[in-house]
Image: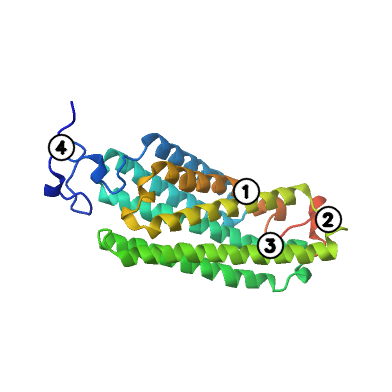
Amino acid sequence: MSAFYANPDSFVTYGPDANCTLELCPIDVTIFKYRPSLAANTVFLVFFAIALSIHTFLGIKWRTWVFSSLMALGCVTEVIGYAGRILMWKDPFDFAGFMVQICCITLGPTFFTAAIYLTLSKIVLYLGPQHGRFSPKLYYWIFIPCDIISLILQASGGAMSSSSSGSSGSAVDIAIAGLSFQVITLVVFNALAIDYAIQYWKAEGRTNTLPTKFKVFLVCLTLGMVLIFIRCAFRIDELSEGYSGHLIHNEKLFIGLEGVMILLSAYALMGAHPGPVFGWPDAKKTKNAASNMEAGESKTEPL
């Protein structure tokens, strides 16, 4: 026997005044048109909480306060976001749960990218600033403000969406602008990193052998960036259709291209933690840092 539902036209299905329930209205009138998976969202919440604990531990161990604080903020934001999706499993018409998850899960990776941007100046100091086209400190001034702009745009889009009960097209456009700016910043960051790598290789690549731990650091850092880039591309495509597009109704894509990508990035960036490579924040690297680090002698400034 098919279930009986009240006429959803007589109920508010979306917004702070929503009064539909699963007993009264069919699932296909919800914002997602599906009931978020309790199992998947619980797994994401638990593993982001574990990542938070590990990044906090690494930050305390290596005194990398800024990098670890940014990673921890990103993990906390993700935990809150997936808690919002769990609320929506309980009640898919829960507007507060929807706004919590859309804002927090969108914003979380911005803190991860800020942590990534901090590492380029450290890499330059570690391998030798003479190979770079810019002063190492300039990388801070280029990328951290760009990440703040991206964060402000995405947060503003989320706030406008909340205040308009999700009906504002401008809010979605602003959020897309923030995500797009984040992608552009990542592309420029990678271009400058590749340029520095080329200059270093031309000057010393054939004569200097880098420590294994530094190679692992670079692989993990690159992996983290690629995963975030894939996720951003998906979210731009998703939000470009607004809250009524087909992508926002596909939970499998969300789990694979949002949840899995960012969770793997959070764990990959553990391997890119600056502490094991650059040491405690006691002294600056010199151009001989790679060989000193291999001997366990070198330390670096705060990160």
Contact (Cβ within 8 Å) of mark 1 with mark 4: no
What secondary structure is marked by label 1?
A: helix
What secondary structure is marked by label 4?
A: loop
Whole-angstrom CA distance, mark 2 to mark 3, is 16 Å
Whole-angstrom CA distance, mark 1 to mark 2, is 23 Å
- The first of marks 4 and 3 along the sequence is 4
**Residue placed most toward the observer, 133 or 298:** 133
What secondary structure is marked by label 2?
A: helix
Whole-angstrom CA distance, mark 1 to mark 4, is 57 Å
What secondary structure is marked by label 3?
A: helix
Q: Nearer the viewer, mark 4 or mark 2?
A: 4
Residue occupying the point 40% across, 63% down = 175
Q: Nearer the viewer, mark 3 or mark 1?
A: 3
Q: Position of residue 191 (x, y in %)?
A: 65, 65
- The first of marks 3 and 1 along the sequence is 1
- The first of marks 2 and 3 along the sequence is 3
Whole-angstrom CA distance, mark 3 to mark 1, is 18 Å
Q: Residues within 10 Å of mark 2 (few under 14, many from 20)?
A: some
- The first of marks 1 and 4 along the sequence is 4
Residue 303 visible? The answer is no
- The first of marks 1 and 2 along the sequence is 1
Horizontal relation, residue 230 to residue 128: left or right: left
Q: Specify the amino acid type for callout 3.
A: Lys
Residue under circle 2? Answer: 291
Residue occupying the point 60% across, 67% down = 188
Residue occupying the point 55% across, 61% down = 114
Residue under circle 4? Answer: 5
Q: Specify the amino acid type for callout 4.
A: Tyr
Mark drawn on residue 122: 3
